[in-house]
Structures are given as structure tokens and as C-alpha cells.
Image: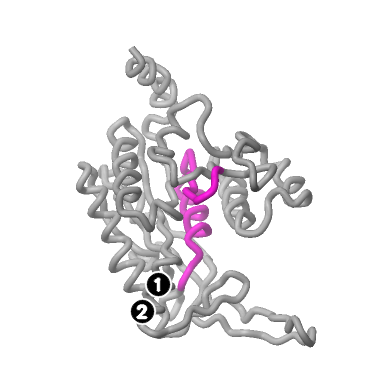
Amino acid sequence: METVNILIEALPYIKKFHKKKVLIKYGGHAMIDSDAMSSTARDTVLLKYVGMKPMVVHGGGPEISRSMNKLGKKPKFIGGLRITDQETMDIVKMVLVGKINTDIVSNICLHGGKGVGISGKDNHLIKARKRAPQVVVDSTTGEESTVDLGLVGEIENVNPEIIDMLTENDYIPIVSPIGVDEKANTLNLNADTVAGDIAAKVDAEKLIVLTDVPGILENPNDPETLIKRVRVDEIMELIDDGIVKDGMIPKVSTCLNAIDNGVKTAHIIDGRIKHSVLLEIFTKKGIGTMITR
């Protein structure tokens, strides 16, 4: 009866989101633990078989840094952005497109899904431009200088044609977050930003961001202070009060941008919890923070 009750509780959500697009951004624990990746992939396939149209964008920052260290190249960051020279870009492509993307595709297919790996370069999915040099302030002297980030990009436009083609033919697209500029140069992009922009462009019902925290917490040291639901107009107050800070700000900003551009709800959830995606979508309580209009 417990199993039956779980299915009955899920039924309204299955009906509500039937044929709706759901974009899941794989990150954190779901990226570095093979069992977690397999479990998340299985949950993604389940969404497909109950009638939704899931799509995936993945990150890979920690894996890129590990590969750089193995190859004797020290990762360097400015304002959270990886300085990306041509050698680093080669490693980024090797890790994102050659390793992580294919691993996710393999896991999707293992569980009966039709996974297809693509990058932002395919069919000019993501047109980008090189980021401007960043201003850096010397903490000792207070002097300002500019640092060229190299092949780091920002999104100009998303062309969803290839994603629409895949989802309409029952495939699950898995997107690596790199883009291409007008001269066909490859640019390194922020995966959260890519996920938000694609979700908006394909008119997704939900954007789900997997992280290694429970969601937005009133007290970062107390998981019991999880904010279950928050409106867009309340977010700035949380930022001003210091509740949303540091690494959570880019994720929240991605969610806000997605909602401003048509995504119905955005969710920040803990990817360390098994079946977190299913718990968030198919249960009344959910497990993370849902951001709404």
C-alpha cells in the first residue's frame, strides 16, 4: 500500500508535466561519483518514460582541474572564471566533450533512454563572444590591472533547432557547455548560464539545478532552515540580507534569468540525495528550493 500511495501522490504531477520540457543541469556530486551519475541518469530516463521531455546540460569544472594538474598545468581563476589559453581549451574539450558527455550518454542509454551527446558548437547551438578582460585589484597596493581570460565566452544567442529536433524524436540531448564565436573559435562557457539560457529558449517548464547543498538556506550551517519556495521578487532581499551569497549567487541568477525569459519554475536541489530529481518533481514536499514568479 505504501508503494501504491507513492504512485497516487505522483499522478497529479505526471499529468501536469506530461509532454513538458524539463532541463536538468548535472553538477556537483552527480558529476564526480559514478554511482550518483548512473542513478541521476536513470531518473532522467524515468522522466522520459512517464511522458516528459528531459534534456541535460552538464558541468565539469573539478574534473577539468584534475586533468590539468595531471598534465602539469596549474588551473588559474579570476572572479570564479577559469583563465583559458589554447592548451587549457584543449583540455576543456577533452574532458567535457570526450569524457563527461560520453559518460552521461552511456548511462542514459544503459537505462533504456536514447541519449545523444552534443556541444554548443553543434549546428551553432550556442553562439558566443569572448569575454572582456577582467579588472583585478591588488589586495596589497590597491592598484587595478586588467587580465585577459583567454578563450572564455559569454552567450550571445541560442539556436535550439537541434535540441527541438532531438526531443521531438524521443531523444534525450546531453549538452556540453562550450560555444563558438563568429570565427569558429571554441569558447569555454559557464554551465549554469548555458542551462538557464537553453531552458528559456526551448520554453522549458522547469529548470532543475543539481548542487551539493540542500538549496537556499536561511542559515548556511543548518539544513533545517531550507527555504522551500521563494518568489522572484523576494530573491533580491535574500541577497541583500546575505542569505544568498558566494557560490549560490550565480546559480540563483541563472534561475532568475530563466524565469524572466519564460521558464515556469526553477529548482535548486541537493544532488547528493539519491533520486533527488524525482523527489523534487513528484512529491508534495519536494526536497530543494523552488523559485517561482
Question: According to the image, label 2 marks what residue?
Answer: 70
Q: Secondary structure at mark 1?
A: helix
Rendered image: mark on residue 202: none
The residue carrying pointer 1 sits among few (fewer than 14), some (14 to 19) or many (20 or more) residues within 10 Å by Cα, namely some
Give the residue drawn at x 40%, y 71%.
64
Residue 88 appears at what percent x and percent y? 42, 81
- Residue type, label 1: Arg
Q: Secondary structure at mark 2?
A: helix
Q: Residue at x 51, y 75 (%)?
A: 152
Question: Are discs 2 and 1 less than 8 Å apart at CB?
Answer: yes
What span is in magenta? 188-214
Q: Which mark is residue 66?
A: 1
Q: Position of residue 199 (x, y in %)?
A: 48, 49
Residue at the front extreme? Answer: 221
Residue 165: tell me if it is visible. no
Three-letter residue code for mark 2? Lys
Residue 5 image offset from top left, x and y in percent: 38, 15
Residue 76: x percent and y percent? 53, 79
- Please say whether residue 151 is one of the residues in the magenta stretch: no
| Vertical arrangement, residue 49 with respect to residue 270, above or below | above
The answer to whether any part of residue 31 appears in the image is yes
| Front residue of 15 and 135 | 135
Q: Is residue 259 above or below residue 93?
A: above
How busy is the neighbourhood of tag 2: few (under 14 within 10 Å), some, or many (20 plus)? few
